[in-house]
Amino acid sequence: MTNNKLKKVVLINQHTTYIFIDIINSFCKEYDEVVLFAGVVRPMAIPLDPKVKVVSIPMYNKKNIVTRIISWFLGFIKSVFLLNFYYRKHDVFVSTNPPLNNFITLFCKNKVSLLVYDVYPDGLIAAGFMTKNNLIYKVWASLNRKAFKKFKSIVAITNGMAKLLSTYVESSKILVVPAWANQSLSNVNDSNETNDFISKFNLEDKFLIIYSGNLGIKHDLESLVELAKNLKEYKDIEVLIIGEGFKKSIIEDLIKNYNITNCQLLPYLPANMFLSMLQAMQVGVVSLEKETSQISIPSKTFNILGVGKPIICLGTEESDLAELLEINQAGMSFTSDSIETLTSFVIKLYADKNYYGQLTENASKLSLKFSYKNANLILKDHLEKSI
């Protein structure tokens, strides 16, 4: 691109939230024309730059595996159509949302960079939908190797993810840039008296341990119910499990069978209450699938750290997240076999204000390493490798 030409870019993310919005806004500093293909945009308190033109593609439908795959295909097909007929001269920056964007370089001649949230088809193996002997896996992996060679740059959000991607493409093309917390967190009121989440669910003066997200088949959420059972004598401690998914009925049955009142199962929260929920918690919970624990740190991790709260990691004690928490003393990791140790940890957090205060301070310090300014590193890599 020469200086006398308009610099144009298309960014693609079927479900656009704060991390990708920060990236888009960073791209606006360098590009004259910025176009976003998206099914939905959830900016929370940090809006898209007004110069961004949003072009609608089909929304991501995660109701079940069939609706997910259909929405992936529809989003991908429309994106390819738009690039080939309306945006052939634009640079392109895509996310793996939809995952079929892995193949986009096979269907267009644009200069394309890729942001990897999840590694597919490996993610489908981790979810239990297929094995490496499956024909779909073999074909997908083969197409990855062909398509990834044509990306100008590839960004991974963990070292483990980069290592897995290196089975498809040379490591020199991969840049590791950690995810980060939502900038909006600094605007959340820290007072329980005015917190919308606490008021709505009558949680005043409670020590809240909160998991919010997918209730997936491989998420160890039963341990939270077991924890609540062990803590039933502590009237001020409340365990909240927020979300939808495969294990919803399992969790409901456990709570009912144990006849406990200090564990609540709540539906997904409206977007305008998400930040209040983060601030209301005393301890945040992240549940990892064992198969992906070495290659992914869920973005909710950085939001919990962003509000200065310690983290309970469930599922495995051998993961990038477990190592991060241990090194920085910002939380602990537990398996389903260590409920008693988990219970003791929570009681110490609840009873020992100095210990809890130290962990919250450590969490706040750790969050500074995961700044939205990382978006500028992604932009820089894209520009340098797209020349």
Image (tube, grey):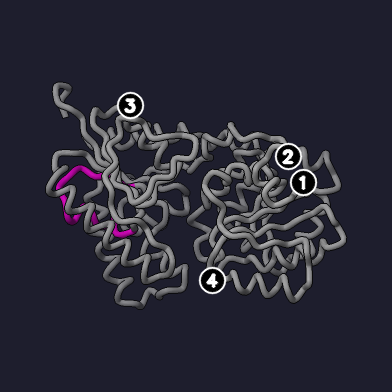
Q: Nearer the viewer, mark 4 or mark 1?
A: 1
Badge 1 crowding class, 10 Å Cα cut-off, few under 14, some 14 to 19, many 20 or more, is some
Name the residue furthest left.
Answer: 85
Q: Position of residue 125 (x, y in %)?
A: 43, 70
Describe the element under mark 2 as helix, strand or loop: helix
Contact between marks 2 and 1 (CB within 8 A): the answer is yes
What's under tag 1, amino acid-wise? Glu
What's under tag 4, amino acid-wise? Phe
What's under tag 2, amino acid-wise? Asn
**Label 1: which residue?**
204
- If you read the primary sequence from the N terminus, does the residue marked by circle 3 or circle 1 appear first? 3
What's under tag 3, amino acid-wise? Lys
Residue at the spot 50% in from the left edge and 61% down from the top edge? 292
- If you read the primary sequence from the N terminus, does the residue marked by circle 3 or circle 2 appear first? 3
Marks 4 and 2, how far apart at CA = 32 Å
Describe the element under mark 3 as helix, strand or loop: loop
Q: Position of residue 72 (x, y in %)?
A: 31, 61
**Label 2: which residue?**
192
Q: Nearer the viewer, mark 3 or mark 1?
A: 1
Question: Is residue 44 covered in magenta?
Answer: no
Residue extent of the magenta highlight: 99-114
Quarter of the image with the C terminus is top left
Q: Quadrant of residue 104?
A: bottom left
Marks 3 and 1, how far apart at CA = 44 Å
In the picture, the disc for residue 246 is 4
**Label 3: which residue?**
29
Q: Quadrant of residue 377?
A: top left
Residue at the spot 57% in from the left edge and 46% down from the top edge? 274
Q: Could you say which is closer to the camera, residue 134 or residue 230?
A: 230
- If you read the primary sequence from the N terminus, does the residue marked by circle 3 or circle 4 appear first? 3
- If you read the primary sequence from the N terminus, does the residue marked by circle 4 or circle 2 appear first? 2
